[in-house]
Image (cartoon, rainbow, N blue to C red):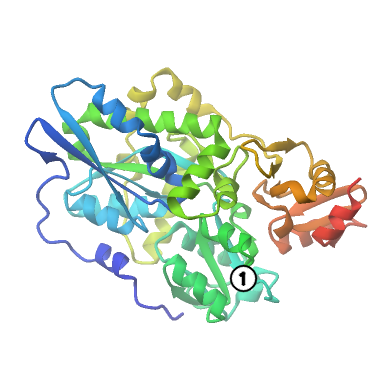
């Protein structure tokens, strides 16, 4: 397998750092600056980044501490988790947010350099793995993972999307090291490569697959939820900072919880806010972060997510990005427990919301939910000029997708949507009389 040169941010992460002294905390003793690293366009971290920043909850809660200090928050926006980790281990960022695989690299680098960090909360997650998707160009003839053998596939090595690619290929009987030509690229570069035809497929994380599908630049080949293995984003903090300023970290986590509550109470307004800050279409943000979106938000560090982290270590080790990682020592939920108090136990055991079909009518800040895709299609058929976006959950995995980008199956009176063609074919093969139909045909069949 050929691999391109690591992007600069990843390369810097893998090189030993020189003496890393100092602290992100700046000030004169009374006036203190807390530095937060976040990724505005990694929209499953918004409750610890973009949305939280816009709401001002962290600053408000810091001012309410009344501990003799005056606090200022320095929000630093990054494209990936790698530079956040580099800055944290250099003592220049106190709190950061990133995806699960970058979190593990964060843990490994922190231990290696004697600057340990800890996972202190979760932002967005999907218990089946639906946050990652493999897509192809709209006119591609590829319909299954088996078709990727010998093809060029773009991904970001060390990311959860690469983990999805590796595992999916293994299940399809393809050696991920020799069976494909892997292009190690940043998401934007990979998206351009897919459009230019220099990559046959792209495996990426939120929000790239949904964005490219929405723009008509890609179609889904593989739904990461088929792996049925959780993937998530979370918050990491430097150990020395957490010990020195526990009330500040608790204030951050309390503010994160409040931002989560806001997202749940105002999902459309939250999507519009994040869209304005990032330049992403609000319809794409809502696909992931909406009321029935692909991502579920709560700060609790669920056992399923810790278990998934432990399983992820082997993927990073095989890519020679880390050695062994003590996940149990990396996870530290004491601060979020204090911040959420009795609510923590409730969130720890809370199930994700049930999948549902949704329509976002034009000119409103409320969506309409339907109990079945057929009911949704019936509404859309009657209001085609008044619809901004239409979402349906995959009939097998529950992953939400744009209705006009889904693969539809007619089975008697049932109209069933699927993210990827392979899962639709699997259903058709197992149900006599069922067949795939176009979206227009599905609309036409709706009563």
Question: Which residue: 88% across, 48% down?
Answer: 446
Residue 173 is situated, as x and y percent measured from the top left of the image, at 61, 69
- Residue at 7%, 33% (x, y): give it: 29
Can you identify the residue that label 1 sits on? 136
User: Tag 1: Cα neighbours inside 10 Å, few (<14), some, or many (≥20)?
Assistant: many
Let me know if residue 111 appears in the view. Answer: no
Which of the 4 quarters of the picture holds residue 435? Answer: bottom right
Residue at far front of view: 363
Give the quarter of the figure containing the C terminus.
Answer: top right
Q: Judge whether 329 appears above or below 279 on screen.
A: above
From the top left corner, tell me how far across and down residue 95 is, in percent.
28, 42
Examine the image and state in which quarter residue 145 appears. Answer: bottom right
Q: Is residue 77 left or right of residue 139?
A: left
The residue positioned farthest toward the top in the image shown: 342
Residue 232, position in %: x, y? Answer: 47, 46
Can residue 83 be seen in the rendering of this structure? yes
């Amino acid at each position: 397998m050929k691999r391109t040169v690591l992007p600069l941010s990843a390369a810097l992460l893998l090189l030993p750092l020189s003496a890393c002294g100092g602290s992100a905390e700046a000030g004169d003793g009374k006036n203190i600056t807390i530095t937060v690293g976040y990724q505005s366009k990694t929209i499953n971290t918004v409750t610890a980044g973009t949305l939280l920043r816009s709401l001002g909850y962290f600053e408000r809660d810091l001012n309410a501490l009344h501990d003799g200090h005056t606090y200022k928050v320095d929000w630093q926006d990054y494209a990936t988790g790698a530079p956040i980790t580099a800055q944290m281990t250099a003592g220049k960022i106190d709190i950061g947010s990133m995806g699960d695989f970058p979190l593990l690299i964060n843990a490994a680098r922190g231990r290696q350099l004697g600057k340990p960090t800890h996972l202190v909360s979760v932002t967005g997650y999907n218990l089946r793995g639906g946050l990652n998707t493999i897509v192809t160009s709209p006119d591609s003839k590829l319909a299954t993972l088996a078709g990727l053998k010998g093809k060029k596939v773009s991904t970001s090595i060390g990311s959860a999307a690469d983990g999805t690619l590796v595992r999916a290929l293994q299940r399809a009987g393809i050696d991920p090291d020799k069976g494909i030509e892997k292009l190690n690229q940043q998401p934007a570069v990979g998206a351009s490569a897919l459009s230019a035809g220099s990559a046959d497929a792209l495996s990426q994380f939120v929000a790239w697959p949904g964005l490219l599908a929405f723009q008509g630049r890609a179609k889904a080949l593989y739904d990461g939820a088929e792996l049925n293995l959780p993937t998530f984003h979370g918050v990491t903090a430097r150990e020395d900072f957490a010990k020195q300023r526990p009330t500040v970290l608790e204030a951050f986590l309390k503010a994160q919880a409040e931002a989560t509550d806001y997202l749940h109470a105002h999902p459309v307004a939250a999507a519009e806010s994040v869209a304005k800050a990032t330049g992403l279409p609000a319809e794409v943000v809502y696909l992931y972060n909406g009321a029935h979106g692909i991502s579920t938000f709560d700060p609790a560090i669920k056992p399923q997510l810790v278990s998934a982290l432990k399983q992820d270590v082997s993927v990073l080790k095989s890519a020679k990005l880390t050695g062994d990682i003590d996940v149990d020592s990396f996870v530290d939920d004491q601060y979020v427990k204090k911040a959420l108090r009795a609510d923590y136990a409730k969130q720890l055991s809370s199930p994700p919301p049930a999948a549902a079909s949704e329509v976002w009518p034009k000119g409103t800040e409320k969506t309409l939910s339907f109990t079945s895709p057929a009911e949704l299609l019936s509404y859309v058929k009657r209001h085609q000029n008044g619809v901004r976006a239409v979402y349906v959950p995959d009939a097998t995995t529950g992953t939400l997708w744009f209705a006009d980008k889904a693969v539809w199956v007619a089975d008697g009176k049932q109209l069933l949507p699927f993210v990827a063609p392979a899962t639709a074919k699997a259903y058709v093969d197992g149900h006599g009389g069922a067949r795939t139909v176009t979206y227009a045909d599905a609309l036409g069949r709706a009563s």
